[in-house]
Amino acid sequence: MMASTMMKEEAQAFAKHLVRESGPLRSGGRMCLRAHVVADRIVFCGGSQGEHSLAFEVSTKERVLAHWGGYVENNGLAVAPVSGQKVSFPSASASSMGGWRTGTVLSVGPKRVRIAYRFKHGGAAETTVPIRELRF
């Protein structure tokens, strides 16, 4: 069975998850790579290598993710975090923190990352999050 291509609303929702922030750069500041939809294309922007875009109507999510990985790597950033690295991830129970928590990567799989984190008032937990939803 073939993977399906995307409609505009699906592409817009998918593009919101494609965010990759760098750590502090030698020149100061940070690099923030993002994706958004313009007309009939998903556009990757924010990198020193310029923009890259794909027609979403003829692209599957897998194809978009493959191009996103290339865009991230071409701009000198890692596609996935490594064990021990601090990352931020979306959390519905972290509304007082803008909906994001910070934790430490325990393990990295091909598509998901296992993260350990602490609650503000003590206690610890672990969760598994898709790589594409992380900020690292």
Image (cartoon, rainbow, N blue to C red):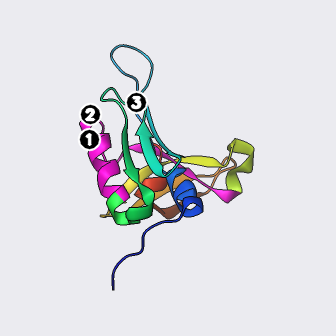
Question: Under tag 3, what secondary structure?
Answer: loop
Image quarter of the C terminus: top left
Picture quarter containing residue 86? top left
**Residue 80 appears in the picture as rendered:** no
> Of the numbered discs in the image, which one, if any, rests on residue 76?
2
Seen in the picture, residue 55 relative to 7 is either above or below; the reply is above
What's the amino acid at mark 1? Glu
Which residue is at a point 42% across and 35% down the rendered structure image? 45
**Residue 34 appears in the picture as rendered:** yes
Q: Are the residues at dot 1 and dot 2 in contact (C-beta closer than 8 Å)?
A: yes
Question: Under tag 1, what secondary structure?
Answer: helix
Picture quarter containing residue 5? bottom left
Image quarter of the N terminus: bottom left
Q: Where is residue 111 shown, x and y percent of the image? A: 36, 64
Q: Are the residues at dot 2 and dot 3 in contact (C-beta closer than 8 Å)?
A: no
Residue to which mark 3 is pinned: 23
Q: Is residue 81 magenta?
A: yes
Foreground pick, 36 / 98: 36
Q: Is residue 129 magenta?
A: no
Question: Under tag 2, what secondary structure?
Answer: loop
Q: Where is residue 112 shown, x and y percent of the image? A: 39, 63
Disc 3 to disc 1, how far (Cα)? 15 Å
Which residue is at a point 70% across and 49% down the rendered structure image? 121
How many residues crowd mark 3 within 10 Å: few (<14), some (14–19), many (20+)? few
What's the amino acid at mark 2? Gly
Q: Residue furthest front?
A: 39
Residue to which mark 1 is pinned: 73
Disc 2 to disc 3, how far (Cα)? 11 Å
Left or right relative to 75: residue 106: right
> Which residues are drawn in magenta?
64-92
Q: Earlier in the sequence, mark 3 or mark 1?
A: 3
